[in-house]
Image (cartoon, helix red, strand yellow):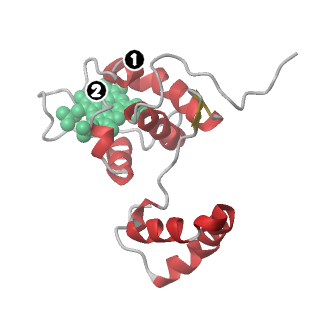
């Protein structure tokens, strides 16, 4: 997940996935393959799905978990509070860098003395949701998701 380079062996491991994607893409076969070659360390980057302003279940989980913990410092909707807003940094921050700060926190070289980012790598309530929160924040950062509680497009229909 944190590797910068990718070995032949790993390429072979991801090949079936790429082929699947290529088949799915049909006529666009050349495009996804070359895109994957270009940023070879993006393979494990979690992807949100947003349709008509509504999210998939995994991204919705991210919204919920973000607002159970992160919001007390980073503000409602990721807009900042005691800690920095996260929508601007997420535009340029790699998933690996996000994961690094999520898992290990940051206590040295912080912008405001004493205002530290806690580590969540061993937090049983939050460690499992690192990717979900990333999807949610990335969707917010990309401007495809409005503030507030999103609707789920894949929610089960209750009668
Ligand atoms: C106790 C307050 C607090 C909580 C809770 C908290 N953070 Fe932070 N976080 C901070 C502070 C303060 C910083 C900025 C540290 C610095 O100055 O570099 C930060 C930095 C970050 C950064 C790096 C931003 C950048 O520009 O480098 C990310 C990403 C982040 N937090 C994500 C999260 C997520 C996701 C959660 C919830 C799981 C969370 N934080 C919960 C206080 C907090």
**Can you identify the residue that label 1 sits on?**
76
Q: Residue at x 16, y 41 (%)?
A: 108
Q: Residue at x 49, y 16 (%)?
A: 148
Q: Position of residue 117 (x, y in %)?
A: 28, 33
The image quadrant that residue 84 belongs to is top left
Can residue 42 be seen in the rendering of this structure?
A: yes
Q: Residue at x 52, y 46 (%)?
A: 47
Q: Position of residue 118 (x, y in %)?
A: 32, 34
Q: Residue at x 33, y 51 (%)?
A: 94
Mark 2 touches mark 1? (CB < 8 Å): no
Return the residue nearer the eye: 110 or 143.
Answer: 143
The image quadrant that residue 85 belongs to is top left
Q: Position of residue 22 (x, y in %)?
A: 62, 68
Return the residue nearer the eye: 75 or 18.
Answer: 18
SS class, disc 2: loop
Q: Quadrant of ligand 1?
A: top left
- Please say if 43 is above or below 33: above
Can residue 117 be seen in the rendering of this structure?
A: no
The image quadrant that residue 113 belongs to is top left
- Please say if 123 is above or below 80: below
Mark 2 CB lies closer than 8 A to ligand 1: no
Q: Earlier in the sequence, mark 2 or mark 1?
A: 1
Q: Position of residue 44 (x, y in %)?
A: 49, 58
SS class, disc 1: helix
Structural crowding at the residue carrying mark 2, measured as other residues with C-alpha within 10 Å and reported as few (<14), some (14–19) or many (≥20)? some
**Can you identify the residue that label 2 sits on?**
85
Mark 1 CB lies closer than 8 A to ligand 1: no
37 relative to 153 in the view: left or right: left
Quadrant where the N terminus lies?
Answer: bottom left
């Amino acid at each position: 997940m944190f590797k910068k380079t990718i070995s032949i062996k790993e390429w072979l491991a991801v090949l079936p996935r790429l082929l699947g994607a290529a088949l799915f893409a049909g006529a666009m076969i050349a495009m996804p393959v070359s895109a994957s070659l270009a940023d070879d360390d993006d393979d494990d980057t979690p992807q949100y799905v947003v349709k008509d302003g509504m999210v998939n279940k995994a991204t919705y989980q991210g919204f919920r978990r973000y607002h159970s913990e992160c919001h007390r410092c980073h503000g409602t909707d990721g807009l900042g509070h005691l800690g920095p807003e996260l929508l601007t940094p997420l535009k340029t921050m790699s998933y690996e860098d996000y994961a690094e700060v999520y898992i290990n926190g940051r206590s040295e070289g912080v912008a405001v003395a004493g205002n530290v980012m806690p580590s969540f790598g061993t937090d049983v309530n939050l460690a499992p949701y690192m990717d979900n929160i990333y999807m949610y924040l990335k969707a917010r950062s990309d401007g495809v998701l409005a503030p507030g509680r999103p609707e789920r497009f894949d929610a089960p229909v209750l009668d």
